[in-house]
Amino acid sequence: MSLYAAYAGNLDARLMTRRAPHSPLRATGWLNDWRLTFGGEHLGWEGALATIVEAPRSQVFVALYDIAPMDEDSMDRWEGVGLDIYRRMRMRVHTLEGEEAAWVYVLNGYEGGLPSARYLGELADAAESAGAPHDYVMGLRKRPC
């Protein structure tokens, strides 16, 4: 199994059960010195798509999943890896048990553009369902769209 760090809609364990049914949630944690942002407005049907960029003193809340080999291709297809929308990137996730190496999906596009209100609401709901701190969830809900 490989470890995947979800930071956007895939924070929702119910959604991940449909996308990767053989891949259980392991833990939650943080990507330190990264921030959640949006880009690729021309790629999405409803505005810009979630991604992460390096940013000192910032953090992104993540859910860690043990991705079974039979679910990896499905996840890559869902995230548009074959269409060059997202790419995989490996990084360190900080959890209560220590650091874990995991992969994330990062947008192949420039930062910029606004997400739709619906999409941003889904991300906030997903973060809340995964146990993100209240101030993190509220920060998502108050972002411009």
Image (cartoon, helix red, strand yellow):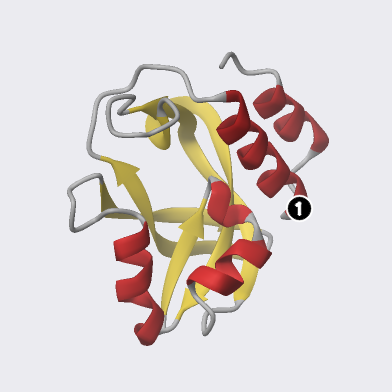
Quarter of the image for the N terminus: give it: bottom left
Asked whether the viewer can see residue 33, the reply is yes
Seen in the picture, residue 75 relative to 46 is either above or below; the reply is below
Residue sitting at the far front: 45
Residue under the image location 35 percent in, 55 percent down: 79
Residue sitting at the far top: 144
Label 1 crowd (10 A; few <14 / some 14-19 / many >=20): some
Q: Is residue 84 left or right of residue 96?
A: left
Seen in the picture, residue 31 relative to 75 is either above or below; the reply is above
Residue under the image location 46 percent in, 18 percent down: 114
Seen in the picture, residue 49 relative to 113 is either above or below; the reply is below
Q: Nearer the viewer, residue 12 or 99?
A: 12
Q: Secondary structure at mark 1?
A: helix
Tally of numbered discs: 1
* Residue that badge 1 annotates: 129
Residue 45, position as x, y percentages in the image: 39, 33
- Which amino acid lies under the numbered mark 1 shown in the image of this protein? Ser
Residue 57, position as x, y percentages in the image: 53, 26
Q: Is residue 31 left or right of residue 63?
A: left
Q: Nearer the viewer, residue 134 or 75?
A: 75
Quarter of the image for the C terminus: give it: top right
Residue 93, position as x, y percentages in the image: 50, 55
Displayed quadrant of residue 4: bottom left
Seen in the picture, residue 84 relative to 42 is either above or below; the reply is below
Residue under the image location 18 percent in, 58 percent down: 82
Residue under the image location 46 percent in, 34 percent down: 33
Displayed quadrant of residue 38: top left
Residue 129, position as x, y percentages in the image: 76, 53
Displayed quadrant of residue 61: top right
Q: Is residue 81 left or right of residue 129?
A: left
